[in-house]
Amino acid sequence: MNGGAARLLRRIAPQLVTLAVILATIGFVFPGFFNIAFANERLYGSPIDILNRGAPVALLAIGMTLVIATRGIDLSVGAVMAICGAIAASAITAGYGLPLTLLMALGAGIACGLWNGLLVAVLGIQPIVATLILMVAGRGIAQLITEGAILTFNDAGLAYVGSGSFAALPMPAVLWLSVGVAVALLVRRTALGMLIEAVGVNRRASSLAGVSSRLLLITVYAISGLCAALAGIIVAADIRGADANNAGLFLELDAILAVVVGGTSLLGGRFSIIASLIGAMIIQSVNTGILVAGFPPEFNLVIKACIVLAILVLQSPALYGAAILLRRTS
Amino acid sequence: MSESQALLRTEGLTKTFPGTRALDAVDFDLRAGEVHALLGENGAGKSTLIKCLTGAYRRDAGEILLEGAPIDPRDTQDALALGIGTVYQEVNLLPNLSVAENLLLGRQPRRVGLVRRRAMNDRARAMLARYGLSIDVTRNLDAYSVAIQQIVAIARAVSMSGRVLILDEPTASLDRDEVAMLFDVVRGLRDNGLGIIFISHFLDQVFEIADRVTVLRNGRLVGVHDIGGLDRLRLVNLMLGRELAEETRETGRGGIDYDAAPRLRFSGTGRRGAIAPFDLDVHRGEVIGVAGLLGSGRTETAELMFGAAPMDCGSVTSEGRPLRLASPRDAIGAGFGFSPEDRKTSGIIGDMSVRENIVLALQARQGWLRRVPMRRQRELADDFIKRLDIRTSDAEKPIGELSGGNQQKALLARWLATNPEFLILDEPTRGIDVGAHAEIIRMIEELCASGMSLLVISAELDELVAYSHRVIVVRDRVHVAELVGEAITTDAIVKAIARPAAEAGENAR
Amino acid sequence: MIAKTLLGAGLLASMTLLSSAALAQTVGFSQIGSESGWRAAETTVTRQEAEKRGIDLKFADAQQKQENQIKAIRSFVAQGVDAILLAPVVATGWDAVLQEAKEAEIPVILLDRMVDSDKDLYLTAVGSDLVHEGEVAGKWLVDEVGDRECNVVELQGTTGSSPAIDRKKGFEQAIADASNIKIVRSQTGDFTRAKGKEVMESFLKAEGGDTICALYAHNDDMAVGAIQAIKEAGLKPGSDILVVSIDAVPDIFQAMAAGEANATVELTPNMAGPAFDALAKYQADGTEPPKFIQTESKLYTQADDPMKVYEEKKSQGY
């Protein structure tokens, strides 16, 4: 097991270093950044904000990692967030009660995932096209549910999911951390992870070796839908309202970016959920850092793009190879 | 041109990789106007030598001389410009472009920046005419057989380089007629003064086409010989550094009790457009060989029997009980295993480790919930690596980095790990080196002795004769003949393949 | 959506029969669609205003497509309506169809948004002045804080959008003379509730909650999000931190009723009222209205019975 831990550390080392460098840079620019206080029975401070605000992208990244490992991609997660947030908001205002509301919203997420999975695995549509359908239609569906306006609610139970705290941590952080650990354990303690990787590397060979790749693909998209549903519920619960126009908008891109920064190849195969989660935290650190730094907003996207470019260049295999070469020649 | 003048020469060529010395001070010379075969087991250094010549690798030491002048190709483009062209086993052209575009890609005749399509097609036709090939050059490359694609690749390489042509296992996926066609082309080029380096595992072909032979072993030069002064056994000995106990047997084997109830019975199973309905009983401890030309329906037979291509008629029983074979999972559940013909696209999971590749089928059968414990995975992998002599630094190495023969052995291990009762092997010895070849044949014999039933497809008839109890001959998607025991000879198989269908049906068995 | 189009088409069809016999005025209204709550309210209020004046309103929903709007205007012209209201989805490409309306001597009044056509092609345009909205918000703050030192944080709209630019400009103009008020942080919240909350959180961290005296948000949605962030930081929005925003959507009135927001500037959905008034004068004695009629940017505070306004607004279809 020790060997396994060492291997994991080696795998996520580049991401950890990147995260540390970014946090250190923010801390340098804004010295009060690491101050953490305890108030209202929870920890309070910018690092906690990163854990809290990073929840949607982190959750999406969990599902996206599995999908990408099968050489797929799920563009619909942002729209699925909007659908599930809208369903949660309308169910709670219709008086269904918290358990049923959560069940309905999560169930809708799974249903969306199954739809994607069927298109990809059974009909053989390319993942980028198959999930594009729901990406476009999904936001429309969400808008139909909320009738175009922000559907607000005042249920304290549902709001707790978005802005409550548990064990001194904000609830969204608790949720993504536990889902992340649960899914990471699920794929590594069972054979799911290995079979997903096998299907991602060579679907035909895997099928001939008896792997039920069709079922596996559907499962992976369903997990992605479920993660998106939870992210959607959190976002809606956070602002106590379902904003169908804006909830999860462009978040699929951040999720894909988190997976890529986490070092999982878009060509499928080897994946690491933990690395993707660190990737999500890297992205959120950049976002929070930009907000804290107080640059004019016109610079936000440019700064973010430059940092992401730097990260990807630093992690690129070509540079890695050059570094090894340099070390050997010196 | 004088015989002694070397066209391409290496002196003391050395290349090391972490842990291995792939080439150790190798001297090699190629004359203009000869076909020079480069032989050796996988790992002997053939591909490393080629890659140094074509600039894919940078050598660590030594000289490369082209017509006496030292050269230092930085990449394959550079090598092409110097006059060294290469054609690989897997044609690396663009299948979705036309033949003409493939031939002239990057050098199309242009007028004001636009490709002059007609001029391009005319030029392509003229190029191919030199090789006795008259085909529609406007069709996509993948509309043609692999042999034609190879010739197109050769034509492209020769037109761009023109002095040295390297053929890296060009015949591996060709049938007999296609090989003959290719060899005509090669001879023509040789007579025009090209120096040709030819790499192949098929010794017959080496004797047929080569003028001289260079043998490598473990990165070292073993010797250079004129083909006239060599016999087959001597050559194999040079390559292996040891004697092969017995190369072939004369006739097939007996000893199967055909009156006993069969293990499996396929009755009238077939699939429209793939293979006509056939009956086939599979007995305990029996090796059934399947012979036929490429595209005759032999692979389709295997895929049908494994559930990879569902049957649309007929039925299957196992030990007398009906068996459903709608998918590979059904087949695996019934104790089947299947090593497909195309190792790279249908067999190995390239980026994954040898261990994971070996465990995969067992794990898939157990289901994702019941993971094979890591310790057991390691045991299995290490055990098979030892038993099948899989050459790898360790079990965690990605299988894609192994040589073809070792990949094949790992695939065999994948199925042996599931303890199958019936193993289907489609071309298990294609494109692998002599040593691994012999070991796989030995494995087949051992497995059937232990009671396993096997169905083996091979284009190597000697090989089929050596291990089969029965041989099914397939032609034009029909099982046309069945030879048993002593009736199995190379001659008989060839005759069955060549005989018209009506006659064959009567004379089977 | 489909139902609405069918309804629109049905109305148009039945209108052909009515128009010759109609005694009352007939006005065609080409609406962009129903992409936001405010847009829906504009449609509702326009209908109410027409009814109040006994005007027969022909409504056509363009579903965000200019070609649908052009089609609708052509059919209004063909039916010989007395006037046309147009809320244009884009600014360009209207010359030809406006020319057709002009030749048919049907006055066109633009609502809410402007077009890049020649001013002669339409009677007038009714809309709000974005800079003025910012000024009203800024002026309220100047009056509210008096001589106190006041550090303001600003939630901007989507970077580069004209409401974000103009509402920022107006607010800055209004506080320019008050040296005690200064904007200490300004960041975009993309007009959304979620971003408003997230950015407010970072403001509170960066500046420290007790040094911030007021929040100015370019729309109410961001303010509603920010109010939650302030509450979660253990501060009282509305008293510890003053909250002023723009738009006057129903939810902000709820917050005002709870004492959590202080003021909002209304972007009125009633564009049709002034339009109909100008039209009536023009038809009565040919008075040419000015080419731009600015709607009132009304300030609402906690003193304005926010709950009542909330109910009123809700009924308008926000």
Image (cartoon, coloured by chain):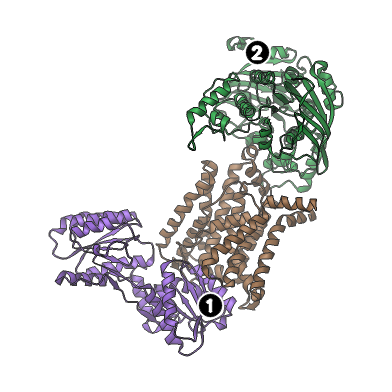
The x, y position of residue B466, in whole percent, is 77, 19
Q: Which residue is mark 1?
A: C230
| Chain drawn in brown | A
Amino acid carrying label 1: it is Ile
| Chain drawn in purple | C
**Foreground pick, B433 / C132:** C132
Viewer-nearest of discs 2 and 1: 1
Point out the image quarter for the C terminus of chain B.
Answer: top right
The x, y position of residue C19, in whole percent, is 16, 59
Amino acid carrying label 2: it is Ala
Q: Residue furthest bottom?
A: C147
The x, y position of residue B125, in whole percent, is 54, 23
Q: Which residue is mark 2?
A: B496
Query: Are there few (<14), some (14-19), or many (20+) residues within 10 Å of tag 1?
Result: many
**Foreground pick, A289 / B17:** B17
Q: How far apart in space, not on screen, are marks 2 and 1 (Cα)?
A: 88 Å
At a point 19% along the width and 68% down the height, the residue shown is C54
